[in-house]
Image: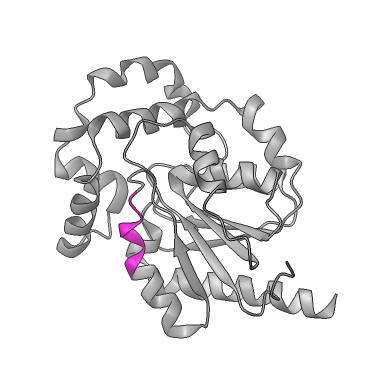
Amino acid sequence: MTLAPLASPLLVLLPGMDGTARLFQRFDAALRAQSAIETQAIAYPAAPLDYAALEAFVRERLPRDRPFVLLAESFSGPLGAALRAHPPPGMRALILCCSFVRNPRPLLAPLRHLLEFVPFGTLPGFALRQALLAPYATPQLQDELAAALAQVPPSVLRQRMRAVLAIAEKDASPSFARGSLPVLYLRARHDRLVPPANALQILRQAPGTQLIAIDAPHMLLQAAPQAAAVAVAAFIAGLSAAQESA
């Protein structure tokens, strides 16, 4: 089957730790308001799956009849990296948003076995706001975050956190570096979870990566959807222009 040109782009969205894809609504609306880019969000099953199982789940649901750009938010970065390393036929580029390809906090890796004692289902709202939304938290954003997390069993959140902490640089980085597809990295200037050095690592592993910093917390797409939409639309337009001149 012949693939359509990237002039009719599709943006496939992979969600953050919640895995529900419910938190893309603000970004999706902002993107549609200023471009012809369509989106397809892939929600993860509410089951304690590791990255390998989630990669297989995502690959089965990717478009097969048209080209697409993949956006991996936060937790989904390693999945985006794996797909870039061995891309399906229609994948044209990767966008990483406040994300990573290996454990962004390696000093915490030895503590992953203690996650069994973390009460994921009863974490206080203040702690989540500080980690994910501060200093851009609003009552509406907090409610949206709480509603999404309420859909995910604590055992699933625990497994996803364990998967993040278990990713070693020697396992993930070489595979990502072998990929050749263009990369855009969206970095939040006020990200309290993924340190700025992570973006520099991405730039070293994928030369030519476009880096855009936005005034936002870790939940960049939710707190700054318009700025994110502008950056993503420009990146995809650049891909289309390069394709037409090739």
Against 96, residue 177 (above or below) is above
Q: Position of residue 181 (x, y in %)?
A: 72, 55
Between residue 88 and residue 114, name the one nearer to us. Answer: 88
Against 14, residue 6 (above or below) is below
Between residue 95 and residue 4, name the one nearer to us. Answer: 4
Q: Residue at x 69, y 74 (%)?
A: 4
Q: Position of residue 130 (x, y in %)?
A: 25, 46
Q: What quarter of the picture does the N terminus occupy?
A: bottom right
Res. 84 in view: yes
Q: Which region of the structure is painted magenta? A: 20-25
Q: Is residue 173 magenta?
A: no
- Quadrant hosting residue 126: top left
Q: How is the image coloured?
A: one colour
Res. 196 in view: no
Q: Position of residue 161 (x, y in %)?
A: 38, 31
Q: What quarter of the picture does the C terminus occupy?
A: bottom right
Q: Residue at x 33, y 64 (%)?
A: 223
Q: How many marks?
A: 0
Q: Position of residue 176 (x, y in %)?
A: 68, 41
Is 112 left or right of 128, judged from the image as shown?
Answer: right
Is 84 left or right of 44, judged from the image as shown?
Answer: right
Q: Residue at x 41, y 31 (%)?
A: 49
Is 176 left or right of 153, judged from the image as shown?
Answer: right
Between residue 37 and residue 89, name the one nearer to us. Answer: 89
Against 135, residue 29 (above or below) is below
Specify the farthest residue to the front: 1
